[in-house]
Amino acid sequence: MIIAANLKTNLTRSATHEYIKQLQTCVQNSSQEVLVFPATSSLDGYDTKITIGAQNAYPVEHGAFTGEIGLDHLNEFGIKTILIGHSERRHILGESQEFIAKKFDYFKEQGFKIVYCVGEPLAVRESSKEEMLTYIYNQYEGIDTEYENLVIAYEPVWAIGTGKVPTLEDIQDIHKELKKKSSAPLLYGGSVKVNNVKDILKVENVDGVLVGSAALYADHFCSMIQAAEELGKN
Ligand SMILES: O=C(CO)COP(=O)(O)O
């Protein structure tokens, strides 16, 4: 399974080094695919079997894009994994589907593993299932769903950082629908914690989890990796 940590705007570079060091023991004998997305300024050359990915980069090698980093900055650390389409970039940073698709194409051309996020806000959730699926399907616009290095993460916006989680039946239902759009591994994200990770990982068509706040604690993230290991679902 894929067990991924999105550290968002947390943990400085030295704290991230400490964090990765603490994770070493639990990934050593684990057969899970573990990904960590540190803050941009915490990207570095980490000596670990954990895959380090970027939370964001501009679709360019380098150039005049104040505040952004480009491909050269990722290459410096051998980073070949990127998160694209996260709801915080869509809704807080104002990234359009068109721009997201452009970013996707660029990093696909570079052969990156792309963890592509989709998910609906609460108002959409509270509408009909049909409207909800239409909303989510629009987030597939311009995206090559057959790209071999693609991982999709379904993250309902209303479940992110709120402690609210869809029912297991709802996760199963939506993952079944999303698998029809793409056979890529499909992660669930949104308030995944140590106490619910096992139940979520057991759901059909859940191929892993993308964890935010609970992953900031190395011991909690470790427990999640171990939970996946115990389930023996690779
Ligand atoms: O946004 C997320 C991961 O990308 C989920 O965040 P939380 O686990 O804090 O809800």
Image: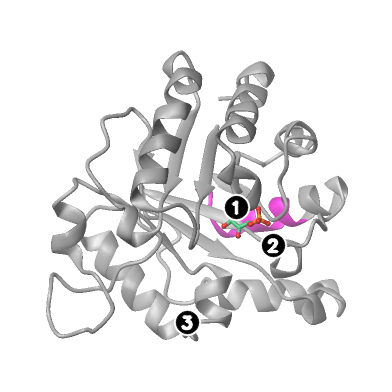
Magenta span dominant secondary structure: helix
Position of residue 165 measured from the top left corner of the image (x, y, whole percent) = 81, 54
Packing grade of label 1 (10 A; few <14, some 14-19, many >=20) is many
The span picked out in magenta is 174-184
- Whole-percent x, y for residue 192 in the image: 71, 46
Residue 180 sits inside the magenta stretch: yes
Residue 192, relative to residue 31: is it above or below? below
Residue 160 is labelled as: 2
Mark 2 residue element? loop
- 10 Å crowding of disc 3: few (<14), some (14-19), many (20+): some
Amino acid marked by disc 1: Gly
Percent coordinates x, y for residue 46 in the rendering = 27, 37
| Residue placed under numbered mark 3 in the picture | 97
Q: Nearer the viewer, mark 3 or mark 2?
A: 2
Label placed on residue 45: none
Task: State which quadrant residue 194 falls in.
Answer: top right
Q: Quadrant of ligand 1?
A: bottom right
Q: Is mark 1 within 8 Å of ligand 1?
A: yes
In the structure shown, which secondary structural element does the residue marked by tag 1 occupy? Answer: loop
Tell me, yes or no, whether the two marked residues, 1 and 2, touch with CB atoms within 8 Å: yes
The residue drawn where x is 40% and y is 29% is 21
Residue found 43% across the figure and 69% down from its top: 143
Cα gap from disc 3 to disc 2, whole angstroms? 20 Å
